């Protein structure tokens, strides 16, 4: 192979050297239980507190509003299921979107089978939520709305602040959960200024370790736990804390860009996305599925007539690693997300996702484009 280029960063990212060092140090030198009262235990507890503060500061919230989980899936489940268990006496109505990550979508299916009324807000062809439809869906019985900030396949950015304000204006007692897994560290988010009640993040999407994540729980929001035990993490996530993972997550957050409302997104990634998008649009066979103003690290496109999986393996043979969509699900019927946006079945079945990181160079993207053109010419005759 001429080279190997990893373009599947929305699925997972490579851990930073500083992250690996922090994990190893915790495993070798700070291995005590943070609940232990001796000096060794206090060293582990310090890692726990420092990482919690690092995440809280980045989101503009209080340290006590952050709890650690095993990742985005658990954070989403704890937020959604925790609200239904704590506030089910207020109402039995939930609202979500048809393009949520499977960790939320499958849970809402389960809740619906348990008797909850679950409504799905309309989205347009780019995956943007229809705010007017959302307003009409919210009732006095609505206890939770759950919408992801950045879609993991299309890179669609939802106007979270506006959605939050819409929800609270229609029903101030409704809670708002945001799956921020693909947005955290890439899209500006200041939860102190937005009426968001719950916000999920995951370590391995930001060059941190796998098996660690966090959930922001706004003060005054009461959740029922999924796991009972020793009462760690404010009695919401019992079990000895994953100190190596937490140490690594803290280091990863320290390396995130400091975003502002003026920039809105990671500018390095945004420039690389624009460069790649311009190159893709020059290829006749390519149809872009992602919105023009999408997340800075994701581009989804289709090659009608060529199966996405076929092209994925053709590129893999040339040292290029991309995906057909979410790594957490696969389907012979194409992308559930693209289908939900009302795009054609042919586009769904031929969809491919490229997702960037800050190590990607223009030369890497040029190689990808050159190889993609070669494989299109080869495969379109089959």
Image: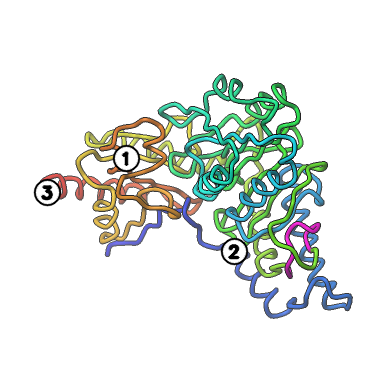
In the rendered view, tell whether residue 243 sits above or below residue 289.
below
Residue under the image location 51 percent in, 48 percent down: 106
The residues tagged by marks 3 and 1 sit, at their Cα atoms, a distance apart of 19 Å
> Residue 249 shows which numbered tag?
none
Q: Could you tell me what secondary structure mostly forms the magenta stretch?
A: loop
Q: Quadrant of the N terminus?
A: bottom left
Q: Which residue is mark 3?
A: 382
Check contact, mark 1 vs mark 2: CB within 8 A: no
Q: Residue furthest front?
A: 115
Residue under the image location 34 percent in, 32 percent down: 343
Q: Nearer the observer, disc 3 or disc 1?
A: 1
Residue 239 among those drawn in magenta: yes
Left or right side of 54 for 318: left
Closer to us: 83 or 319: 83
Q: Which residues are magenta?
A: 232-240
Residue under the image location 76 percent in, 67 percent down: 229
Closer to us: 281 or 112: 112
Q: Which residue is mark 2?
A: 211
- Location of residue 341 in the rendering, given as x and y in whole percent from the top left corner: 40, 32
Q: Give the SS element for disc 1.
A: helix
Q: Which residue is mark 1?
A: 348
The residues tagged by marks 3 and 2 sit, at their Cα atoms, a distance apart of 41 Å
- Location of residue 243 in the rendering, given as x and y in whole percent from the top left corner: 71, 69
* Precedes in sequence: disc 3 or disc 1: 1
- Location of residue 342 in the rendering, given as x and y in whole percent from the top left corner: 37, 30
* Precedes in sequence: disc 3 or disc 2: 2
Find residue 133 and report its image quarter. top right
Find residue 162 and report its image quarter. top right
Residue 146 among those drawn in magenta: no
Check contact, mark 3 vs mark 1: CB within 8 A: no
């Amino acid at each position: 192979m001429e080279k190997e280029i990893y373009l599947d960063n929305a699925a997972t990212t490579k851990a930073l050297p500083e992250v690996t060092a922090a994990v190893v140090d915790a495993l070798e030198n700070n291995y005590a239980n943070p609940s232990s009262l001796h000096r060794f235990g206090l060293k582990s507890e310090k890692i726990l507190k420092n990482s919690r503060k690092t995440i809280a500061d980045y989101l503009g919230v209080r340290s006590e509003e952050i709890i650690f989980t095993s990742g985005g899936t658990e954070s989403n489940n704890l937020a959604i299921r925790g609200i239904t268990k704590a506030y089910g006496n207020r109402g039995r109505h939930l609202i979500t979107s048809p393009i949520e990550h499977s960790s939320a979508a499958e849970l809402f299916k389960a809740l619906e089978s348990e008797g909850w009324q679950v409504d799905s807000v309309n989205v347009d062809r780019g995956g943007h939520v229809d705010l007017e439809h959302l307003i009409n869906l919210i009732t006095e019985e609505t206890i939770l709305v759950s919408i992801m900030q950045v879609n993991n396949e299309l890179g669609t950015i939802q106007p979270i602040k506006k959605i939050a304000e819409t929800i609270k204006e229609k029903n101030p007692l409704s809670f708002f959960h945001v799956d921020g897994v693909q947005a955290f560290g890439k899209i500006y988010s200041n939860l102190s200024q937005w009426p968001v009640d719950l916000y999920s993040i995951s370590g391995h999407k930001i060059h941190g370790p796998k098996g660690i994540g966090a959930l922001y729980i706004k003060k005054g929001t009461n959740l029922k736990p999924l796991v009972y035990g020793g009462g760690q993490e404010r009695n919401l996530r019992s079990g000895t804390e994953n100190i190596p993972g937490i140490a690594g997550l803290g280091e990863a957050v320290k390396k995130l860009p400091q975003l502002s409302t003026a920039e809105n997104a990671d500018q390095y990634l945004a420039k690389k996305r624009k460069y790649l998008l311009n190159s893709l649009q020059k290829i006749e066979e390519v149809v872009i599925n992602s919105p023009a103003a999408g997340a800075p690290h994701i581009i989804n496109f289709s090659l009608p007539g060529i199966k996405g999986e076929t092209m994925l393996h053709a590129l893999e043979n040339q040292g290029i690693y991309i995906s057909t969509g979410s790594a957490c699900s696969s389907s012979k019927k194409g992308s559930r997300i693209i289908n939900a946006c009302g795009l054609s079945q042919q586009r769904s079945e031929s969809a491919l996702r490229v997702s960037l990181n800050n190590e990607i160079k223009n030369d890497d993207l040029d190689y990808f484009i050159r190889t993609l053109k070669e494989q299109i010419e080869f495969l379109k005759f089959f």
